[in-house]
Image (tube, grey):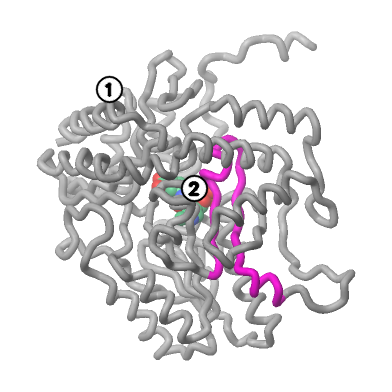
Amino acid sequence: MNIQQTRPPAATPNDLAAYWMPFTANRAFKRAPRMLAGAKDMHYTTTDGRKILDSVAGMWCSNAGHCRDPINEAIARQAATLDYAPPFQFGHPQAFELANRIAALAPEGLDHVFFCNSGSESVDTALKIALAYHAVRGDASRTRLIGRERGYHGVGFGGISVGGMVNNRKMFGSLLTGVDHLPTTYVREKQAFTKGEPEWGAHLADELERIVGIHGASTIAAVIVEPMAGSTGVLVSPKGYLQRLREICDRHGILLIFDEVITGFGRLGYAFAAERYGVTPDIITFAKGITNGAVPMGGALIRGEIYDAFMKGPDHAVELFHGYTYSAHPIACAAGLATLDLYREEKLFERARDLEPQWADAVMSLRNEPNVLDIRTVGITAGIDLAPKDNAPGLRGMEALNNAFHDHDIMVRVAGDTLALTPPLIVSEAQIGEIIEKVARVIRSVA
Ligand code: PXG
């Protein structure tokens, strides 16, 4: 080992210039960095040794809490045994085992898994499979994709095309052609301060009929929605909305894709939100929680009939021209298997379900804090809309994130002026109390 390898890493790099940080106010960050050095269970530690309560599971990822030994040990074992295996024309046992395990958690019928490395890739994968499915069946005029206003489906060109958050779209050209958007399901006047699914709004799914009326069902390949729109600030599906989308899709031969990158693996109290809502889509995308965030991984769960439609033609021929160098990476698969074991052993999905009423009550207790315009909750999530400061949308949110970290030892997420709370599912009742107390102080600090 040379000297460089044995030297302990500097606590804080002294030059922050080279790293162009993603989705970050780079200049503000580099003036006052929020630097993380370690993590365990419900807490991060900072480079200056403070303990920060994690109220967001990293970024909706670490549902079992941080640095869990069984996951770390599985990663280390796998790295020492099979570090990399080419996924095209070769396999390794953990990939098949993990696919089986994920399919077993999914609603009946969703029994094939395509692996990739992120939520964005999982969305591109789902959209491409939807288009190709219609093509292999001789229905190649079905090319139109339908997303939703305020939807977030990652940052690939497919994902930003069907996504509906303007800042993620407006700088990037004409995007995919042939995309339409459903309206958002969120209307504050009708839904403010709802715990769980709002009563009002199922009829907004009928907008899909209107879109069919404009373009013709024979041109539409798929509809993609998040069962709970997370990134835009926790927008909960109204009661009956997803059922209605399913019915309309069925009527017109349109595939329904649920983007469960956030809602998968327990966030709403079930393995997938599809189960909570009793609605089975044709494709589910997942990422984040599959490895507890410890190794990048994403994927798409596919209905058997879709898979079967591709399994035609000569035996030696590749059936789908799609895949990634790191699809089903052995270390990600090992982390995924250990993560699913942990979720099962600690009954974390059930735990989330049991905690939901208490969580919702606790979060709603913030409704009289200054500038709170709305609070939404579902599963172990919450969105808290704060009034924007005059002429400076997003400033109050950024100040809240910053004050939370520097002054109140808690990590929160913000989307504009909306705070999002999504703690690891191991959160204790006492820690829920601590989150609420700290967030109340944060909200007051930006009053
Ligand atoms: N789909 C959904 C529904 C997501 O929430 C992605 C796709 C993309 O995943 P990748 O792995 O490519 O980032 C996401 C990502 C937030 C936040 O603050 C949410 C996400 C990413 C970053 C921030 O809520 N979700």
Name the residue rendered at 72%, 54% in the picture: 324
Indicate which disc, 1 or 2, sits on the residue closer to the N terminus: 2
Name the residue rendered at 59%, 60% in the picture: 301
- Label 2 SS: loop
Q: Position of residue 37 (x, y in %)?
A: 50, 21
Quadrant containing the C terminus in the rendered view: top left
Task: Note whether 411 is above or below 417 in the view shown.
Answer: above
Please state which amino acid type lies under the numbered disc 1. Asp
Q: Which mark is residue 407?
A: 1
Q: Position of residue 155 (x, y in %)?
A: 52, 55
- How packed is label 1: few (under 14 Cα within 10 Å), some, or many (20 or more)? few
301 left or right of 315 in image: left
Q: Which residue is mark 2?
A: 265
Q: Is mark 2 within 8 Å of ligand 1?
A: no
Judge whether residue 127 is colored magenta. Answer: no
Quadrant containing the N terminus in the rendered view: top right
| Nearer to the camera, 173 or 343 | 343
Q: Which mark is residue 193?
A: none
How many marks the image carries: the answer is 2
| Nearer to the camera, 108 or 79 | 108
| Circle nearer the viewer, 1 or 2 | 2
Residue 164, quarter of picture? bottom left
